[in-house]
Amino acid sequence: MGDLYLDIIIKNGTLVDTTGCYQANLAIKDGKINAIFRGNKGLDATRVINADKKLIFPGIIDPHVHFQLQDLGKIISTDTFASGTQAAACGGVTTIIDFANQTRGISPLKDFNERKKNADPQVAIDYSLHLSKTDMEYLDEIPTLISEGVTSFKFFTTYSWRNLDLNDAELLHFFREVRKYRGMVMGHCENDAMVLNYRNELIQEGKTEPIFHAHSRPHIVEEEAIQRVLLFAKKTGVKLHLAHITTKQGSDSLFHAKQHGLKVSGETCPHYLLLNERAYKGPDGYLNLMSPPLRHAKDQQALMRRIKDGTIDQIVTDHCEFSRASKGNGKLPFHQILNGIPGIETSLPLMHDLLVNKQKLTYPQLISLMSTRPASIFGLYPQKGSLMVGTDADIVIFDPNLKKTISPEILHYSIDWNPFMDLKVRGWPIMTILRGHMLCESGKFIGPQNEGKFLKRSISQLNGFNYER
Ligand code: DUC
Ligand code: ZN
Ligand code: ZN
């Protein structure tokens, strides 16, 4: 059978990419998509999968996750790169981008190398890293980082109490340097002084329950910071990506910036679309703290409009998993509770149910938001984010009619709680394939545990835009 003998043939499925949905068979050989064809063609394979009434998606890409989060050198989140990437695979995710966080005063190259060394032996799916820049030292390492495949540089406008923020002068200087080397910046945008001010007022008034986390970071906190960094991006010409937009005002600012021709993109997360401030009430309210905080129905409707009109480019999870104990078991004031919730395993089924089943977006729109745009924004397309012959065979087989109720028991996280507890969805991934390796089948991780590889990204076509020379 020679070259024509294939590893996997997926028959009778409906393939989905950004151009449309079409009935075809897909063949995999040596980790790549080898053929897309109709009929029989006399091909044979080690495994033939009948995907009748199933959808075939390119692997989901989540370019904003925090596995094995460290603070001051200590791991504080509950997952590891191993457990996190296995849960991701069970949710149909085949590529993540995590972060190497620069420790102030330390070489970011060193932080990057350590983070990579840590992740490499553990990852079940492919991954890349953004570099979070926390001071003005070592800006001269940017070109070396870019040549190592780190092309996106994160900044924070807040978290001064954790030494993560850059001030305005630093931001402008940092943007100019990244622009010089043709990279892109990605921002967590909240006004630090306002957060501190609101927070102190609330604490002085004895208002320390979880709901006051949201009150300490009202809409203006996000709106101001987004508008400021957009101005800085305009001034310096750097490509800018806005992380986790939560407000109507933030998404409107992105819309106007795009209309004015800025090289800018933006994202939101399933929790901002599905949960609101009410999730901070009740005995488990403390678990749902993240930043920026959950908002109101009006914001959810506005975000949905900006998804539909193409302003919001991608859906990411900002996955950051903590146990009840590490969140303080409900005994801490809001400003001492660790921020972050899990989301990576449920993002595809939740977004399929919300965006396709309920909001009537098309399957190509869903795949654009969760695979193709993330790949193209961060320089992974077309190797990732497409179903094209010759590209990586990262595939999700999705049953659009399989019904599930979200609960910790059906998920692969290492925690006993979930922010989307008891939500019912129709549609669930039933197989996940990474470069031809079957990783998950029928809700179980069955694949090789460390088949994942580091993806070196290149600056050409980052954000879907080229810098003019
Ligand atoms: N906020 C962040 O900025 N990072 C991780 C999780 C969170 O809630
Ligand atoms: Zn953030
Ligand atoms: Zn984050």
Image (cartoon, rainbow, N blue to C red):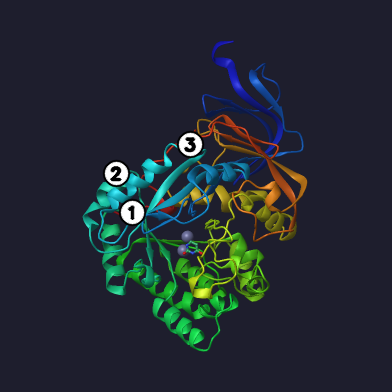
Residue at mark 2? 147
| In the foreground, 11 or 196 | 196
Q: Tell me the kind of residue under disc 1.
A: Gly
Residue at mark 1? 183
Residue at (36%, 66%) from the top-left corner?
A: 164
Question: Residue 457, can we see it?
Answer: no
Q: Tell me the kind of residue under disc 2.
A: Ser
Q: Tell me if label 3 and label 1 are in contact, CB under 8 Å.
A: no
**Earlier residue among tags 3 and 1:** 1
Q: Tell me if label 1 and label 2 are in contact, CB under 8 Å.
A: no
Q: What element carries label 3?
A: loop
Residue at mark 3? 452
Circle 3 Cα neighbour tier, 10 Å, few/some/many (<14 / 14–19 / ≥20): many
**Earlier residue among tags 2 and 3:** 2
Q: Where is residue 207 in the image (x, y as percent from the top left)?
A: 55, 84
**Earlier residue among tags 1 and 2:** 2
| Marks 1 and 2, how far apart at CA | 11 Å
Q: What element carries label 1?
A: loop
Q: Tell me the kind of residue under disc 3.
A: Gly
Rendering quarter of residue 154: bottom left
Question: Residue 464, can we see it?
Answer: yes
Query: Which quadrant holds the N terminus?
Result: top right
